Amino acid sequence: MQSGAPEGTVTGEAVGREKTRQRVIEAAIGLLEREGREAVTTRAVAAAAGLQPPAIYRLFGDKDGLLDAVAEYGFDAFLATKHVAPEPADPLDGLRAGWDLAVEFALDNPALYTLMYSEPGRATSTAFRTGMRMLKERVHRLALGGWLRVDEDLAVMIIHATARGAALTWLSLPEEARDPALLSTLREAMTNAVTEPEPAVRDAGPAGAARALRAALPEQTTLSAAEQQLLREWLDRLA
């Protein structure tokens, strides 16, 4: 006969531990938003959560572990906004809307956003990686439609970097110096940097791309005559 706590007791303890952990994270976010990062000490968070300080160490290891958990909560919250936002029919409107969504989250949660992105090491959570995967999927759809001016990886970096930089710059400015034109100008600069005004490919899919490339083939001088002939044969099959 095996000894140990009944399964129901173990499950109940795990649920209780998770609820306590969530309560601590919410208490830390409250302190962060009201009083700033310096106020988020293990003693202050424990008091706000109705616990003794040693409980913080049992749950998170140390203060850095607690801050990592708070940042993870932020990435989860941001990811949730992406799931509920409707996708515009126009792909460029969708790109702008996604960029605006990222900046709006920062403006609505300034202290939390600063914690999330001020230290690059924190941008490794599962939720962050999922958000980046969603961005890559959006960029890939733009590429399929012939909208991209640059390659996909560079487009992802530009979109992410401009939204992050715009948000952190805005939050660093005194309120009286915050000009909304800063955000709209950066958004349009991003859009112009990564996309064409009109799609290079009118018909989505390989056939449309093949027709567009076949039409432009005589204008290029990189390939030899034999290479052009071979490529033209392949494009004819795809088109």
Image (tube, helix red, strand yellow):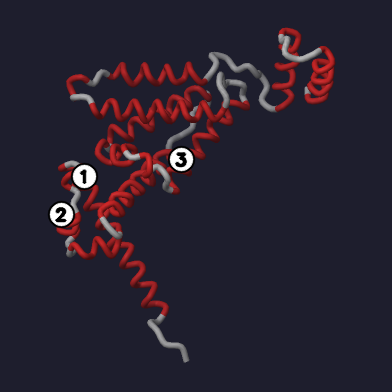
Quick one: SS at disc 3? helix
Check the image and report above or below for 70 versus 15: above
> Which numbered disc, 3 or 2, marks the residue that appears first in the sequence?
2
Label 1: how many Cα within 10 Å (few below 14, some 14–19, many 20+): many
To which quarter of the image does residue 149 belong? top right
Tag 3: residue type?
A: Gly
Q: Which residue is mark 2?
A: 44
Give me the residue at 56% from left, 28% from top. 152
Quick one: SS at disc 1? helix
Check the image and report above or below for 215 versus 28: above
Q: Could you tell me residue 121's position as x and y percent? A: 38, 43
Q: Which residue is mark 3?
A: 131
Label 3: how many Cα within 10 Å (few below 14, some 14–19, many 20+): some
Q: Which residue is mark 1?
A: 32
Check the image and report above or below for 115 versus 67: above
Q: Could you tell me residue 29's position as x and y percent? A: 24, 47
Tag 1: residue type?
A: Leu
> Which numbered disc, 2 or 1, marks the residue that appears first in the sequence?
1
To which quarter of the image does residue 219 belong? top right
Using residue 209 as the reference point, say whether residue 96 is left or right of it: left
Give me the residue at 47% from left, 26% from top. 95
Give me the residue at 48% from left, 18% from top. 193
Measure the C-alpha gap from mark 2 to mark 1: 11 Å
Q: Could you tell me residue 35's position as x and y percent? A: 15, 42
To which quarter of the image does residue 171 belong? top left
Using residue 127 as the reference point, say whether residue 195 is left or right of it: right
Q: Which mark is residue 179?
A: none
